[in-house]
Amino acid sequence: MSKITYIDHNNVARTVEAPEGLSLMEAALQNMIPGIDGDCGGNCACATCRVDVNEEWMRLLPPVSPEEQALLNIIDSKTPQSRLACQLKATPELSGIVVHTPSGQH
């Protein structure tokens, strides 16, 4: 199991455990984490699962795909640490990852 900490826009941290291979979006939805909508069900088609990853974890993430980049490009409030949680999987290497959720995804 991997530990994932989601910090919402009010600075409230919620840590959950996720089995290896589960996306950070799925883990958030299963644990009712506010700020993650996942409207497309994790198909990299809507950008409603955007998170900002703490800087120290960025080098451990898989590269951004062209599809993910296209969706990130339409988000006004994106940062260099913005990623789609549907594209990030729980792994032993990412156990302890910290991500920030926005106040809303729309």
Image (cartoon, helix red, strand yellow):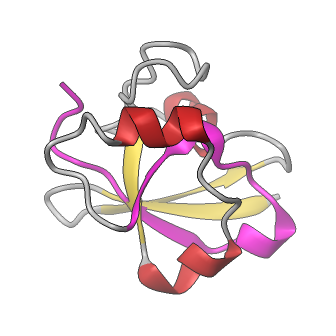
Residue range highlighted in magenta:
81-106
Q: In what quadrant of the picture does the N terminus appear? A: bottom right
Q: Is residue 8 left or right of residue 88?
A: left
Residue positioned 23% across, 39% down in the render? 75
Would residue 67 be visible to someone looking at this image? Answer: yes
- Total number of numbered labels? 0
Q: Does the magenta segment cover residue 97?
A: yes
Q: Does the magenta segment cover residue 62?
A: no
Question: Can you give x and y, in whole percent of width and height, for residue 17 in the image?
Answer: 68, 54
Name which quarter of the figure residue 76 lies in: top left
Q: Give above or below for 79 relative to 49.
A: below
Q: Give above or below for 2 relative to 47.
A: below
Residue positioned 63% across, 41% down in the render? 87
Would residue 33 be visible to someone looking at this image? Answer: no
Q: In what quadrant of the picture does the C terminus appear? A: top left
Q: Of residues 72 and 8, which is closer to you in this image?
A: 72
Question: Can you give x and y, in whole percent of width and height, for residue 25 in the image?
Answer: 55, 37
Question: Can you give x and y, in whole percent of width and height, for residue 2 in the image?
Answer: 75, 62
Q: Is residue 96 left or right of residue 8?
A: right
Q: Of residues 15 and 22, which is closer to you in this image?
A: 22
Q: Is residue 93 left or right of residue 57?
A: right
Question: Can you give x and y, in whole percent of width and height, for residue 50 in the image?
Answer: 38, 42
Name which quarter of the figure residue 92 lies in: bottom right
Residue positioned 74% across, 54% down in the render? 90
Residue positioned 36% across, 42% down in the render? 72
Q: Residue furthest top?
A: 40
Q: Of residues 44 and 27, which is closer to you in this image?
A: 44
Q: Residue furthest bottom?
A: 56
